[in-house]
Image (tube, rainbow, N blue to C red):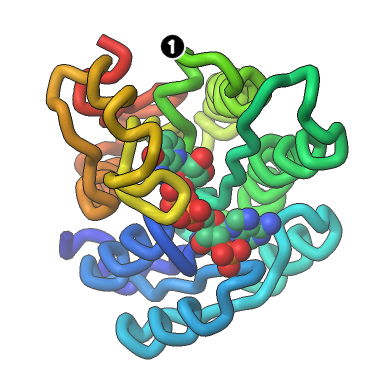
Amino acid sequence: MADIMGKKALVIGGSRGIGAAIVTRLAADGAQVDFTYAGSRESAEALAQKTGATAIRSDAADRDGLIKTVRDAGPVDILVFNAGLLVAGDPLELAADNVDRMIDVNVRAPYHAAVEAARAMPDGGRIVFVGSVNGDSMPFPGLAAYAMTKSALQGMTRGLARDFGPREITVNVVQPGPTDTEMNPADGPMAELMHSVMAIKRHGNAMEVASLVSYLVSADARGITGAMHTIDGGFGA
Ligand code: NDP
């Protein structure tokens, strides 16, 4: 979309999956894109090479490191927080440290990244969090803590939309359903169960999610804020 031509975008967690699709789409739309990664250096470098984006190593779970990364990126017109972990299993068995790391990456990090980005963001900027349909509905056992982290983004978004609205900065959540990535492969062991509760019985594609993000950061979406945008093939219908 031409209207983000030359805008500066920062994608937190862009090396693989949905994040890589968002980097690819925003770069194709004409934005100057920086993106972070934690562990996947090869994927990040290949994506940077392919799209012209800049890859920055930064673990979102390291609060002060993340805040510094956002500050060092300079004023950004668009912040997309995509990084996420999924820790699944019987809550009576899960390691507390693993659950807490997921909360660090999925909840604390998007809050601190958004607040830091907003300090320098020009009026009319855009903040998009990648949440999940599981923020609204959780039909399966074993995912209580993950669902909790994605519901937390909803309250964060409503509040930050109020805080930054006077500057015409919009804050939104994109909530994918099952989407074919390494986190949730279309041929994974849970795929059939997921498809059984979907209206469109297939995994989504990461570029479909990126397309919704592309719309939300465009000028056309200037009046959309404090809202959840679900793209889930009817998983939560
Ligand atoms: P992947 O596991 O395929 O990719 C996760 C991305 O997040 C990678 O680029 C990874 O980078 C990055 N990341 C993870 N932890 C950190 C960290 N500590 N610091 C910086 N980057 C990090 O996941 P998906 O693409 O499937 O998921 C992306 C988002 O979409 C997540 O928030 C997820 O919860 C959400 N989602 C996904 C769904 C799906 O079905 N796939 C459904 C609903 C929501 P690296 O490898 O370099 O660490």
Judging depth in this view, the residue of 211 and 226 nearest the camera is 211
Position of the C terminus, as image quadrant, is top left
Q: Residue at x 69, y 46 (%)?
A: 105
Q: Secondary structure at mark 1?
A: loop
Position of the N terminus, as image quadrant, is bottom left
x, y (%) of residue 42?
A: 51, 84
Which residue is tagged 1? 139
Would residue 75 be seen by someone viewing this image from the given angle?
no
Asked if residue 20 is positioned above or below residue 53 in the image, the reply reads above
x, y (%) of residue 101?
A: 78, 44
Count of numbered tags:
1
Judging depth in this view, the residue of 195 and 157 nearest the camera is 195
Asked if residue 28 is positioned above or below residue 150 in the image, the reply reads below
x, y (%) of residue 5?
A: 26, 69
Residue 116 as seen in the image, left or right of residue 218: right
Q: Residue at x 43, y 11 (%)?
A: 139
Asked if residue 176 is positioned above or below residue 227 in the image, the reply reads below
Query: At label 1, which amino acid type do we have?
Result: Pro
Q: Residue at x 50, y 49 (%)?
A: 82
| The furthest residue to the front | 189
Asked if residue 42 is positioned above or below residue 199 in the image, the reply reads below
Residue 3 as seen in the image, left or right of residue 42: left
| The furthest residue to the bottom | 49
x, y (%) of residue 210?
A: 28, 51
Would residue 90 be seen by someone viewing this image from the given angle?
yes
Question: Residue 88 is drawn in which quadrant?
Answer: top right
Q: Residue at x 85, y 59 (%)?
A: 64
| The furthest residue to the left | 200
Question: Residue 148 is drawn in which quadrant?
Answer: top right
